Amino acid sequence: MTFFEIVRGPLAWVSFLVFFLGLVYNLYNFFKRAQKDKVLYGYFSLKHTLRSYLFWLLPFGSYSMRQRPLFTVISYVFHVGLLLTPLFFLGHIEMWKESWGISWWALPNIVSDFLTVLTIICGVVLLLRRFLVKDVKYLSTPVDYALLALVILVFLTGFLARYQMFLPYQVIAGLHILLGEVMLIFIPFTKFSHIFYFWLIRAYTASEFGAVRRSKDY
Amino acid sequence: MEGFVRKPVSDIGIDKTIERLDQQKIKRAIERVLNEEVTVRFKIFLETCMRCGMCSASCHHYLSHDRDPSYAPASKVKLTLGDLVAKKGKIEKADLKRYARIAFTECNLCRRCTQFCPFGIDIAYLISLVRRLCGVLGVAPQFIQDQVYSHMSSYNMLWFKQDEWIDTIQWIENELRYEIKNARIPLGKKDADILLLIHGLEAKYMTPLLSNMLKIMLVSGVDFTLPDTDGWDYTNKSLYMHDFETMTLVTKRHYEIASKLRVKRILITECGHAYRAALYESARLLGWKEAPIPFIHAVEFFYEILTQGKIKIAHKVKEKATLQDPCNIVRYRGLGQKLRFIVRELCEDFVEMTPNQEYNYCCSSGGGMVDAGPPWKGARIEGGKVKIEQIKETGASLVIAPCHTCHKGIEDLIEHYKVEAHVKFLADLIAEHMEIPERLRP
Ligand code: HEM
Ligand code: HEM
Ligand code: SF4
Ligand code: SF4
């Protein structure tokens, strides 16, 4: 098997499996351990949770975001790219079709290219920010730099593969796929888990701030 | 610890206790607090923090220390629990000392940072865990410990004896008769509408404030009583040490007195932390979802008697006034609007601080920092720079602070930073400015 075949075949299986099992395990673990917590279930308020999701997902919806407009824009664009491109990039969908015969709506290539470039730029700005802004630098651990760099590299190699620049397609695409898979595997086990913990923590904080404290968490 | 530079401060409650500890004890306490008591929140908060720094500028300590990164909320977690987890629990005594200093004297548990974190990570909960860890080891500022021991033995914060209590109320009643005809302050009366609990300090050093509160009660004509036994002091300082055992003991006592006297509601004077403790923090630990008997704050009471016309403001305050929103009753219980209604009734010229209401900055004395006593006064004065700037910007000469802690904290800030202003409680202002009907005059 060539490197490309390995990452395209067995490793893809491994990464998706680890990702899903990790996710399920984490959520199971959370909901089980949450039973021991007197606050989490007892005070959960759906109304306040939805209210909080809404204001924290809308751009500039929260007071905190309004205080930090530049960061908000950058982080917002970064995340839009992170969520949309992997799921709706035509090249990705074609691979699903090839392997599984399924496909769904795709972004026009020009849009995904544009988003990719924007995501890379925003990622680099976030990385520079980690090096330059005093408090963020103080907080950062090596893992924070590494994970951010990983995200940037996944996007960069994906873009390079698409335009077949620098390296032969199989090498650069293989590299992209490998990094993408590493990222997927990391989601349940690193701070990337914020993708699902976001919803759970917000539910707690929103319920406490809304229902118990009659105040605002956004 | 890298980047953590502080002037040495000595506090025997922290330093001496740590000297006496051995590694075995520390290990057992960590085991107890961070393995047995803690829930899944601990793990997911630590894991989810992206170290993005969105919370930094929300904290008045960070802003007041010229943006020294070691005062940022997420840094305080990194320097305490983060450090403990990284060292797998094998910490030195010097580490414990740093944890205690950060948890007790550099965070007011005001939860402003939680509003700023995009995930809503509850930093104050994490800092509370550090306090709990220190607390079970007996490591806490000596002044806080003293108050907690006092609660354990006498149910009040300052070793006040039961006869002194009854005596105090009786002489206040006597004095009030010069102003209110046949003033009568019932103690231990059954079936009253309201059980009034007071702040320990009001019984000892701040009797004029208590006297004003009682005057308002009498003029409003509500049916009330005070306890005739220990348990009249609502302050529950054990919250600061996260000594849940004493904390629930005190709270239970208050609700027991109320149910024995068959009152309809419990009312407390102007205080923040005790309100939060009795309403939910402590009530929860006792297994109640909400307060088992309605528990109301003076702000709610004043709002009620003003809107129902039970008291009237005779003449308004003329000087320019501003308002401190105490975290514990506004960010923690949404009393901001009622508070504003009262202040507008009272003052002709009212200016808001910015930011205000639920986004207001803590006075830098809350969460036990004022109770940490003289050794830590410097810490709260330094941390209060943001607050004093906010006050100066309003140009007000009167700061209304409906909370004992805010009141004391701002008074000290004003004195230290030499600002031309003074601080008042609502009860003092209302008592001075309300109308005393003809029939009540002696
Ligand atoms: C619903 C999904 C998601 C939500 C609600 C979310 C939310 C957040 C928030 C609130 C932050 C902190 C503030 C910021 O830097 O913007 C953050 C940071 C970050 N997120 Fe997400 N995120 C999501 C999905 C993802 C995904 C799919 C990835 C990619 C694996 C990702 C990677 C990152 C990275 C690398 C950072 C750190 C940026 C830095 O270092 O400054 N996020 N996310
Ligand atoms: C297991 C996983 C993955 C596989 C097999 C894969 C495969 C590929 C391939 C083959 C390309 C080049 C398409 C072409 O030839 O035109 C590509 C492009 C790309 N991939 Fe992936 N990828 C994976 C995961 C990811 C992940 C997790 C992300 C981002 C979070 C990502 C983001 C991108 C981007 C941004 C491009 C370039 C799109 C453009 O320039 O329009 N990929 N991917
Ligand atoms: S003082 Fe308030 S804002 Fe600062 S860390 Fe503590 S809870 Fe957060
Ligand atoms: S805002 Fe939240 S996620 Fe960001 S550093 Fe602060 S606590 Fe961590």
Image (spheres, coloured by chain):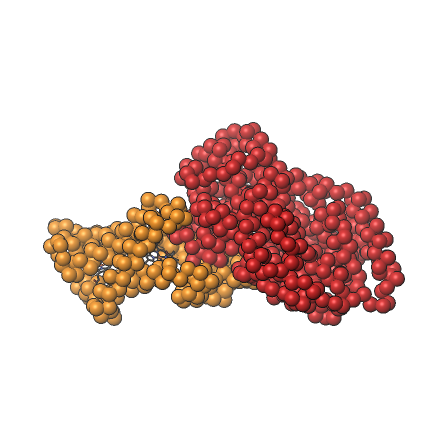
Chain colours: A orange, B red
Left/right of residue A194 with respect to residue B345 in the rendered view: left
Q: Residue at x 28, y 51 (%)?
A: A149
Q: In the picture shown, does residue A163 fall above or below B59?
A: below
Q: Tell me residue B101's x, y (percent).
A: 53, 40
Closest to the observer: A174 or A30?
A174
Closest to the observer: B92 or B9?
B9
Closest to the observer: B130 or A35?
B130
Left/right of residue B413 with respect to residue B431 in the rendered view: left
Closest to the observer: B11 or A25?
B11
Q: Tell me residue B195's x, y (percent).
A: 74, 57
Q: Quadrant of residue B378?
A: top right
Q: In the picture shown, does residue A92 fall above or below B256?
A: below
Q: Tell me residue A116's x, y (percent).
A: 25, 62
Q: Is residue A192 visible?
A: yes
Q: Residue at x 47, y 41 (%)?
A: B80
Q: Residue at x 72, y 60 (%)?
A: B429
